């Protein structure tokens, strides 16, 4: 990934095409109980950039800062994979630009109204009005987190 831009809340990155980084991909399902000899099922290699980026021209990565989306599983320091070619829709998690600030929130649409919904009860919903400068930069497609 190459760093593209940085804001106080989010760090933007773009895919670095052509690197061809692959890792072994085990096609067997992993039981959450007993051990499995996974090495016996290794059949191919998987390219994470090809898997996570449907369209490298419209995909970028963002590192999250803050905890307004913790109940959606998005924590401080996580990396989001975002596709700008996808249409915003009710219930989707989106990267939005509102009044000059970037934020990640769940979109809630009602007749004639859009709300940016946090996934943490400590944060209020934000109603987008005609007085806001607002745009959806992209839709979150994957979450990369350290465990």
Image (tube, rainbow, N blue to C red):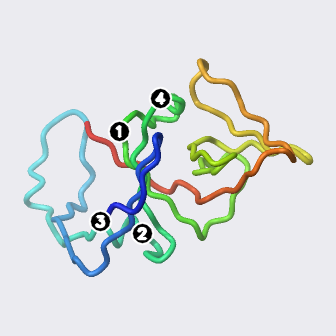
Task: Check disc 2 and report its element: helix, strand or loop.
Answer: loop
Tell me which label, 4 or 1, sits earlier in the chain: 4
Q: Which residue is mark 2?
A: 53
Residue 48, label in figure: 3
Q: Which residue is mark 1?
A: 77
Mark 1 neighbour class, 10 Å CA radius: few under 14, some 14 to 19, many 20 or more: some
**Cα separation between marks 4 and 1:** 9 Å
Mark 2 neighbour class, 10 Å CA radius: few under 14, some 14 to 19, many 20 or more: many
Asked whether disc 4 touches disc 3, contact meaning CB atoms under 8 Å apart, the reply is no
Decide: is 7 above or below 83. above
Q: Nearer the viewer, mark 2 or mark 1?
A: 1
Residue 16, image x, y percentages = 30, 72
Residue 33, image x, y percentages = 22, 33
Q: Residue at x 91, y 46 (%)?
A: 111
Q: Residue at x 78, y 45 (%)?
A: 132
Which of the 4 image quarters holds residue 12?
A: bottom left
Q: Which residue is mark 4?
A: 67
Residue 92, image x, y percentages = 64, 49
Q: Is residue 83 left or right of residue 3?
A: right
Task: Check disc 4 and report its element: helix, strand or loop.
Answer: loop
**Cα separation between marks 2 and 4:** 25 Å
Tell me which label, 4 or 3, sits earlier in the chain: 3
Tell me which label, 2 or 3, sits earlier in the chain: 3
Q: Is residue 129 left or right of residue 143?
A: right
Decide: is 28 above or below 22. above
**Cα separation between marks 4 and 3:** 26 Å
Q: Residue at x 57, y 66 (%)?
A: 84
Task: Check disc 3 and report its element: helix, strand or loop.
Answer: helix
């Amino acid at each position: 990934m190459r760093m593209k831009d940085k804001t106080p809340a989010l760090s933007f990155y773009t895919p670095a095409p052509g690197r061809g980084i692959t890792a072994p991909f085990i096609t067997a399902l992993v039981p959450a109980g007993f051990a499995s000899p996974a090495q016996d099922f290794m059949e191919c290699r998987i390219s994470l950039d090809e898997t996570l980026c449907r369209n490298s021209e419209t995909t970028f990565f963002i590192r999250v800062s803050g905890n307004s989306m913790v109940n959606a599983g998005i924590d401080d320091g996580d990396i989001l994979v975002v596709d700008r070619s996808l249409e915003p829709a009710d219930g989707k998690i989106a990267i939005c630009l509102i009044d000059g600030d970037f934020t990640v929130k769940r979109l809630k649409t009602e007749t004639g109204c859009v709300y940016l919904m946090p996934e943490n009860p400590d944060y209020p919903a934000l109603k987008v009005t005609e007085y806001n400068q607002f745009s959806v930069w992209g839709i979150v497609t994957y979450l990369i987190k350290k465990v």
